[in-house]
Amino acid sequence: MNETGNLVERCRRERNALLAATLLRRLENRGFDAYYCATKEEALQQALALIPKDHVVSWGGSVTIGQIGLQQYCRAHYRCIDRDTAKTPEERAELMRQALLCDTFLCSANALTADGEIVNIDGNGNRTAAMLYGPRQVLCVIGLQKVCKTLASALDRAHETAAALNARRFPDNNTPCVKTGLCFDCNVPDCMCNYILTIRRSKPAGKIKVLLVGEEVGF
């Protein structure tokens, strides 16, 4: 890396550490347990430190937990409820229902406000449902690139950035964002934005644990 690249990286690290310190205080004020991990590797180790060995683990659709290696590690070392092992749509739906009563649920978020509110959009509602009630704890891994100043801008990010990018994972969906890359607030059968969740606080305190990651992860 050249001198300019080193400068950019140093400034990014320093800014991320300052931003994370502010966010940690605000998240903790809302009842979340919160941690800052500068790298994906640190995020993986912190997540594993929070999951007891006897826990049954599951997850919703999340690119982030795959990027840090958490999904893969849990498949190899924990008892998991994994919908991707299903052989039929009916079995997949049943596994998604069972995941609502796992011990540790893994997920990410589409956006996080600067004041510490978590925003998620969901197509089926299984991910948002598990974040609200059922699992003993929820581990939410969020890259700092998802931080938005206000709730309104967080909702915009969830639609315009996260949902539009996530839609590319399902190119057979007949939605405007798949065809154009832009959100049109659609009302079509394949819509991926059916459930919109804002989590203002964790109740009980500490049930939702937020891991902020300094490297860009997820959509």
Image (cartoon, rainbow, N blue to C red):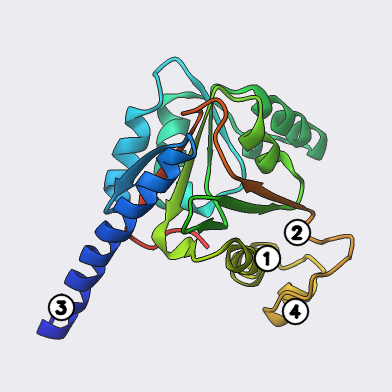
Q: Earlier in the sequence, mark 1 or mark 4?
A: 1
Within 10 angstroms of label 1, few (less than 14), some, or many (20 or more) residues? many
Measured in 3D between alpha carbons, the distance from the residue under mark 2 to the one under mark 1, in whole angstroms, is: 8 Å
Above or below, 147 relative to 185: above
Residue 171 is situated, as x and y percent measured from the top left of the image, at 71, 68
Disc 3 marks which residue?
Answer: 7
- Tell me the quarter of the picture where residue 159 sits: bottom right
Within 10 angstroms of label 4, few (less than 14), some, or many (20 or more) residues? some
The disc labelled 2 sits on which kind of residue?
A: Met
Q: Earlier in the sequence, mark 1 or mark 3?
A: 3
Residue 12 is situated, as x and y percent measured from the top left of the image, at 25, 69
Q: Quadrant of the N terminus?
A: bottom left
The disc labelled 4 sits on which kind of residue?
A: Lys
Q: Earlier in the sequence, mark 2 or mark 3?
A: 3
Measuring 77% from the left and 46% from the top, which residue is drawn there? 124
- Which one is nearer the viewer's eye here, 66 or 13? 13
Measured in 3D between alpha carbons, the distance from the residue under mark 2 to the one under mark 3, in whole angstroms, is: 40 Å
The disc labelled 1 sits on which kind of residue?
A: Ala
Residue furthest toward the top?
54
Disc 2 marks which residue?
Answer: 192
Residue 91 is situated, as x and y percent measured from the top left of the image, at 77, 31
Within 10 angstroms of label 3, few (less than 14), some, or many (20 or more) residues? few
Measured in 3D between alpha carbons, the distance from the residue under mark 1 to the one under mark 4, in whole angstroms, is: 10 Å
- Which one is nearer the viewer's eye here, 116 or 120? 116
Disc 1 marks which residue?
Answer: 167
Measuring 64% from the left and 72% from the top, which residue is drawn there? 160
Measured in 3D between alpha carbons, the distance from the residue under mark 2 to the one under mark 4, in whole angstroms, is: 14 Å
Q: Is residue 187 left or right of residue 218?
A: right
Please state which of the two labelled residues, at mark 3 or mark 4, is closer to the viewer.
Answer: 3
Please state which of the two labelled residues, at mark 1 or mark 3, is closer to the viewer.
Answer: 3
The disc labelled 3 sits on which kind of residue?
A: Leu
